[in-house]
Image (cartoon, rainbow, N blue to C red):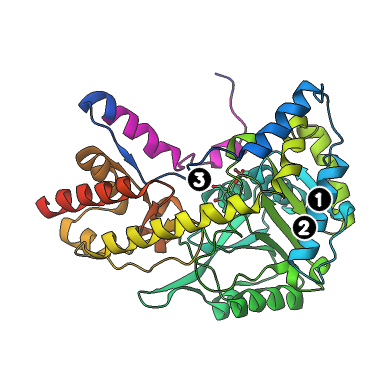
Amino acid sequence: MIQFSNSIGKLTGESTLLYQDIARRVEKERGIKTINFGIGQPDVITFKEIRDKAKEALDQGFTSYTPAKGIDELRQKIAEYLSIEYKGSDVKKEEVIVTPGAKTALFLSFLLYINPGDEVLLFDPSFYSYAEVVKLLGGNPVYLNVNFDEKSGFSIDLEDLKEKINSKTKMIVLNSPHNPTGMVFSPSEIQGIQEISKERGILLLSDEIYDHFIYEGKMRSVLEDPEWRENTIYLNGFSKTFSMTGWRLGYIVAKKEIIDKMGILASNIYTCATSFAQKGAIESFNTFNHVEEMISLFRRRRDVMFEELSKIDGIKVYKSSGAFYIFPDVGGILERTKLSVKELSIKLIEEAGVITIPGEVFPLELGKRFIRFSFAIDEEKIKEGIRRIKETLDKS
Ligand SMILES: Cc1ncc(COP(=O)(O)O)c(C=O)c1O
């Protein structure tokens, strides 16, 4: 057989989708309907105004390639929106590139900077894709301690960050609100990371894709620092805020020289983001009334999920302040059942018909004691799913 490249061999492929596959098998074999707490997307259809604009663009024949960095109107809209949202950021159209999803934005960012042997500092735990792409490019993920306290939630260890920076460190990846913990990290933590990265001359990649999913506390964006251009790549997308996961639209903000290089990569990899989807996305900036409704709905669901999870023995749960995830410490259950967190998640699919994502999908250490629950699912299903989990665990 013709050999695959060395880099592909570095990927584990272990993502959240694996658990959906197990669920499909269980549904088929046992004829039961599973409840899915593994979902990473809002359960509402993209708002009508956005759909209508994309349809209009299609009907008007807006079906050709667009410029590699995206259509001017959308880049301009993104720049204006961010400049209003984060006063002083003064983002310009030339500092924006539209990408096919935030995942591609991440990929371009790593591709532009990572050489074999470079180290990238990631939170432990973090979104699985960061480490995978870093490894694909021959870089090495290095994990920063995230601490957990049942009362105050998750926090970043800035001392650990300082200690782990060395001559090989190229980049720090920040993500707040955070997948998988649902934590909105405090403004002082974000500023602390930003200061350290500037002082040490390290690139800061900030993935703010959950920026509208805030239930408590104040979200601090890296763009609030007027000096953001010095060393920052800001990343966002339409998938979560406007429930547009299938449209594949994300964007990067960085100084013009970086965006120009990204444009060269884009034109060689995918040419451009989908033309009519970009037209639809322009309209999304007029739909924040729907976003607010969705966030109120999600806040209620979070409250219900927190209350229900709190009733389970062996779980320590913090009521998440952002995103749409709750990440409880299930260490007590693991000790009692002698299962690993992965085995526990599989048991919950097979015996309770409930899909959750074991924390070890989000490497490295901390996740081994935690499970991610998404509350992007209706209230009745949340109650029923957690009732089933409790019943299964009571029997174990
Ligand atoms: C933290 C984080 N970043 C990026 C993405 C990717 O988003 P997109 O659908 O825009 O590729 C996700 C999706 O789950 C995510 O959780």
Q: Can residue 202 be seen?
A: no
Query: Between residues 157 and 44, which one lies in front from this camera angle?
Result: 44
- The CA span between labels 3 and 2 is 22 Å
Query: Type of residue at label 3?
Result: Pro
Q: Which residue is mark 2?
A: 81
Figure check: 340 above or below 164? above
Q: Secondary structure at mark 3?
A: loop
- Find disc 3 in the rendering and name its residue: 42
Q: Are marks 2 and 1 in contact (CB under 8 Å)?
A: yes
Q: Judge whether 135 appears above or below 266 on screen.
A: below
Q: Mark 2 CB in 8 Å range of ligand 1?
A: no
N-terminal of the two: label 1 or label 3?
A: 3
**Rendered location of residue 57, percent (x, y):** 78, 28
Residue 124 in the image: x percent, y percent? 49, 63
Range covered by the magenta-colored residues:
3-26
The answer to whether the beta carbon of the residue marked 3 is less than 8 Å from any atom of ligand 1 is no
For the point 84% across and 37% down, the residue is 68
Q: Secondary structure at mark 2?
A: helix
Helix, strand or loop at label 1? It is: helix
Q: Amino acid at mark 2?
A: Tyr
Image coordinates for residue 302, horizontal then vertical, percent = 40, 59
Q: Amino acid at mark 1?
A: Lys
- Quarter of the view holding residue 65: top right
CB-based contact (under 8 Å), mark 3 and mark 2: no
User: How busy is the neighbourhood of tag 2: few (under 14 within 10 Å), some, or many (20 plus)?
Assistant: some
Mark 3 nearby-residue class (10 Å; few <14, some 14–19, many ≥20):
many
Q: Nearer the viewer, residue 244 or 335?
A: 244
Q: Name the residue beneath numbered marker 1.
A: 77
Q: Earlier in the sequence, mark 3 or mark 2?
A: 3
Residue 42 horizontal side relative to residue 277, left or right: left
Give me the residue at 44% from left, 56% from top: 325
Residue at point 67%, 55% (across, down): 117
